[in-house]
Image (tube, rainbow, N blue to C red):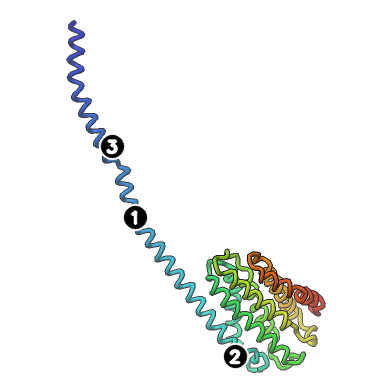
Amino acid sequence: IGIGGHDAGRSQKVKPVEQAFLRIMKQMKQKRPEHRVTRALNDIMPKKKNEEKEQEDRTGVVRHQIYEYAHAILLQANSSGGDKMEEEEDTQVDQVKLIHLLGFLSKALCNAACFSTSERLSLGEDCVKLALSQITSMQKLGGSFTKVSNMLSKAMLMSATLSSLHASLESSEGEQEGEGEQERDFAARVLASLLQHKLQFPSSDASANNGQAAVMAECYILYGRCIVSSTEKLFSLATSTKSVQIGIKLLPLSISSLLQLVDSPYDM
């Protein structure tokens, strides 16, 4: 009986302790550290999102400024036309700067992160006009470059222009709503323009030095790649029946132009 009484008294003494312990556990459960962490994260996340948005805005501004600069330079080059190629006192510094700019565009235009679709197509249009002005200028020379002081720099400019044009056709950016038609119209204009204005260096310069001949050969290769890429772009726009129709219509001329490149006097 003594033992039993002792146990009963002990359980009565322990009960208030257990109740106190349960109250403490309940309070701890109501004020879990996770709640404080969650509140801290909620305070941090908006700030982080704002910083990301600000960074994105700054990137967009810089990207657009690069586009504006490149577009202005190409417009200036196109406004002067290809007649400068006939002048002995051509400004070599401006031409070198233009080649450097086109070299940058040949790497940037095929990267969707560098330019928006409208900016890429706009710069591509500038490159088409520049290429056509150079081809037209060469045709006016009547098969001789005797009037040109430095044919190598002219061939390098043509190569850089065609390389940038090809990059504008090779962008890996996914199509968004309404962009398919822009891509189709651009590819169709490029293909029609190149087929109408065929690249042809004067045959009298076929015996040019190795460096010059190599650059000319590269021009022919890039010219062919632009034809292939623009044709491929038209057929890849499967959602547009008009694109396929344009591609089929111009396909014979495209194949003929590519076959003519095989007869080039330069090794390719």
Q: Which residue is mark 1?
A: 44
Q: Quick one: 177 or 81, which is closer to the camera?
A: 177
- Give the x, y percent position of residue 132: 67, 84
> Between disc 1 and disc 2, whose residue precedes?
1
The amino acid marked with disc number 2 is Ser
Q: Which residue is mark 2?
A: 80
Disc 3 to disc 1, C-alpha distance:
24 Å
Marks 2 and 1: in contact by CB < 8 Å?
Answer: no
Under circle 3, the secondary element is helix
- Give the x, y percent position of residue 134: 67, 86
Q: Quick one: 237 or 61, which is closer to the camera?
A: 237
**Label 2: few (<14), some or many (≥20) within 10 Å?**
few
Q: Which residue is mark 3?
A: 29
**Label 3: few (<14), some or many (≥20) within 10 Å?**
few
Q: Which residue does the image show at 75% across and 73% down from the upper left?
A: 251
> Between disc 3 and disc 2, whose residue precedes?
3
